[in-house]
């Protein structure tokens, strides 16, 4: 896994009008992030993070939120006791871009 390269990059805002990534391009980027990230229907990335308690899960959620604001790239975040699920895709094109993989690596770096 080589997520440090992606985590060091910045997300590039999508202006729309570009097709979402598909096929081999997705799998090349997927190989560069943690294997626990699921590539769901070539549409979005999803990962669950487990924590010892609610406070730790909330703290992680807040760190991911800070990264989202800094990168102007906003995932769906589900917070529960000891669990955070992050779902990422580029809403403007209803699919995945390279920036989604960059953001996934940044989530892992926020642990």
Image (tube, grey):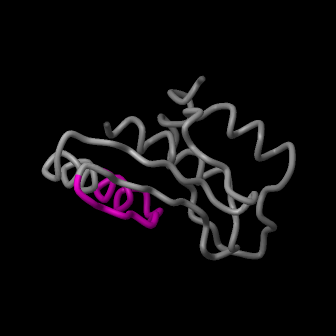
What residue sits 42% from the left and 38% below the top? 108
In the displayed structure, does residue 32 sit left or right of residue 77?
right
- x%, y% of residue 5? 56, 29
Of residues 98 and 61, the one drawn nearer to the viewer in this rendering: 61
What residue sits 64% from the left and 31% below the top? 32
Q: Is residue 72 within the magenta segment? A: yes
Quarter of the image where one finds residue 34: top right
In the displayed structure, does residue 80 sit left or right of residue 46?
left
Of residues 76 and 70, the one drawn nearer to the viewer in this rendering: 76
Residue farthest along the left direction in this orientation = 55
Q: Quadrant of the C terminus?
A: top left
Q: Would you place residue 74 above or below residue 27 in this image?
A: below
Q: Is residue 76 within the magenta segment? A: yes
In the displayed structure, does residue 18 sit left or right of residue 68?
right
Q: How many marks?
A: 0
What residue sits 70% from the left and 73% below the top? 93
Residue farthest along the right direction in this orientation = 23
| Residue stretch in magenta | 64-81
- x%, y% of residue 39? 67, 50
Q: Quadrant of the N terminus?
A: top right
- x%, y% of residue 46? 54, 53
Residue farthest along the top direction in this orientation = 1
- x%, y% of residue 64? 33, 52
What residue sits 25% from the left and 49% below the top? 82
Q: Would you place residue 3 above or below residue 71 in this image?
A: above
């Amino acid at each position: 896994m080589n997520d440090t390269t992606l985590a060091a990059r910045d997300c590039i805002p999508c202006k729309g009008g570009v097709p979402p990534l598909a096929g081999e391009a997705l799998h090349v980027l997927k190989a560069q992030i943690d294997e626990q990230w699921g590539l769901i229907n070539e549409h979005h990335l999803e990962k669950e993070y487990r924590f010892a308690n609610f406070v730790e899960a909330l703290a992680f959620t807040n760190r991911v939120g800070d990264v989202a604001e800094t990168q102007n790239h906003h995932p769906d975040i589900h917070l529960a006791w000891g669990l955070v699920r992050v779902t990422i895709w580029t809403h403007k094109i209803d699919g995945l871009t390279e920036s989604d993989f960059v953001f996934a690596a940044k989530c892992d770096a926020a642990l």
